């Protein structure tokens, strides 16, 4: 949180004014910061309730591009974000009029998480980044890098020894097959979102270990598929005769491939310069080198923008019949 506050230039802002200060410049950034803090340690039900409220808040921010902060504080801004007039309600998302007791239990818990987040942001901003940053950065980047390297080596050893039957490959393969089986006529598209090492594993499965599987859209986020290809770690990828001009052929079992990276993320790499059929999109998480890699999926604006990109992708109109496991 300290790094996010520092990135928005809010250090030293006192009282209930950190969010209102940011809202004058960007409501989307305000929502990202608030919901990212509220998501800390939320369980699946709490995260789902927060996500539903985030959809409403993003629609509010999109339709009301500015917020009149005169006389309002951070708590009033939060309530304003969650007030959705009946004419503006999002299909399938319960409307939230006020922080009243009429809400469902999970919605009330989500609202109080957001209240708490307002207080935490105000406290951290007023104190400045030094103390908060030390707490945030207890786990060094060196330790995180070591864990990531261990994950890579574990997966590669399992693939070498067991191929598609390795514990990791088998688990992800079952999940992809299950996703395909769950497609219906009303919901015929299979969109796979794979973060970090997950992107490398999914590409390896679709291109080499389990090519009978398929998806309509592959979304890799903060991933290293391009680096794996250039290091020769993907058996289905051959070294190009001319790296400047040649591209790895697009996978026939993947409809569209969206690759998202934060320029500040040291573990995120582009793919379009290596793979045909892949499209790169830069996205700023608002975080620095230490925490950008884990910030993508916690920010409402990421999901909002991804939804817009998915609308541009060709999607099936009926569910295909895929091989069963």
Image (tube, grey):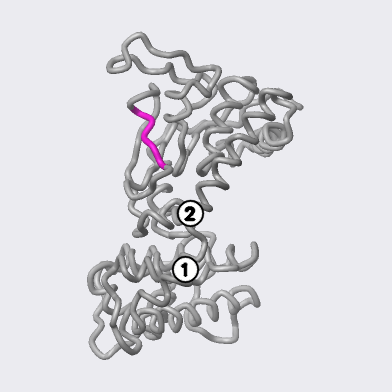
Decide: is 75 above or below 90: below
Mark 1 vs mark 2: give the one in front: 1
Relative depth, front residue between 187 and 112? 112
Relative depth, front residue between 116 and 311? 116
Q: Earlier in the sequence, mark 1 or mark 2?
A: 1
Q: Position of residue 8 (x, y in %)?
A: 29, 68
Q: Quadrant of the C terminus?
A: top right
Residue, x 50% and y 81% (percent of image)? 116
Give the class, few, some or many, for how many residues have Cα within 10 Å of label 1's Cα (few <14, many ≥20): some
Query: What segment carries the magenta color?
Result: 268-272
Looking at the image, can residue 192 be seen?
Answer: no
Decide: is 77 above or below 249: below
Residue, x 49% and y 20% (percent of image)? 232
Q: Position of residue 297 (x, y in %)?
A: 48, 54
Q: Residue furthest top?
A: 241
Q: Is residue 257 left or right of residue 21?
A: right
Relative depth, front residue between 59 and 258? 258
Q: Is residue 142 left or right of residue 74?
A: right
Q: Secondary structure at mark 2?
A: helix
Q: Position of residue 295 (x, y in %)?
A: 45, 56
- Disc 1/disc 2 C-alpha distance (Å): 13 Å
User: Disc 1 vs disc 2: Cβ atoms closer than 8 Å?
Assistant: no
The residue indicated by pointer 1 is 136
Q: Position of residue 50 (x, y in %)?
A: 53, 67
Q: Secondary structure at mark 1?
A: helix
Looking at the image, can residue 33 be seen?
Answer: yes
The residue indicated by pointer 2 is 294
Give the class, few, some or many, for how many residues have Cα within 10 Å of label 2's Cα (few <14, many ≥20): some
């Amino acid at each position: 949180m300290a790094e996010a506050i520092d990135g928005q230039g809010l250090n030293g802002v006192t009282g209930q004014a950190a969010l209102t200060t940011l809202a004058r410049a960007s409501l989307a950034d305000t929502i990202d910061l608030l919901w990212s803090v509220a998501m800390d340690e939320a369980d699946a039900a709490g995260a789902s309730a927060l996500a539903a409220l985030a959809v409403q808040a993003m629609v509010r921010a999109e339709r009301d591009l500015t917020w009149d902060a005169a006389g309002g504080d951070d708590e009033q801004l939060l309530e304003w974000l969650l007030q959705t007039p009946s004419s503006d309600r999002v299909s399938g998302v319960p409307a939230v009029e006020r922080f009243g007791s009429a809400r469902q239990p999970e919605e009330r818990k989500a609202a109080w998480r957001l209240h708490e987040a307002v207080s935490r942001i105000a406290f951290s901003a007023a104190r400045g980044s030094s103390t908060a940053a030390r707490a945030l950065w207890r786990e060094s980047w060196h330790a995180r890098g070591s864990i990531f390297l261990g994950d890579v080596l574990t997966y590669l050893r399992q693939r070498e020894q067991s191929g598609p039957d390795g514990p990791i490959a088998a688990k992800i393969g079952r999940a992809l097959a299950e996703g395909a089986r769950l497609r219906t006529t009303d919901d015929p598209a299979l969109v796979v979102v794979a973060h970090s090492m997950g992107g490398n594993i999914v590409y390896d499965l679709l291109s080499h270990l389990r090519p009978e599987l398929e998806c309509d859209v592959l979304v890799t986020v903060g991933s290293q598929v391009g680096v794996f290809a250039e290091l020769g770690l993907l058996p289905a990828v051959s070294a190009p005769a001319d790296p400047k001009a040649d591209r790895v052929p697009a996978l026939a079992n993947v409809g569209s491939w969206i690759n998202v990276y934060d320029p500040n993320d040291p573990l995120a790499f582009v793919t379009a310069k290596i793979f045909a059929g892949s499209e790169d999109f830069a996205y700023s998480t608002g975080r620095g080198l230490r925490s950008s890699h884990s910030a993508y999926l916690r920010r409402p604006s990421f999901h909002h923008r991804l939804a817009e990109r998915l609308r541009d992708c060709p999607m099936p109109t009926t569910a295909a019949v895929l091989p069963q496991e």
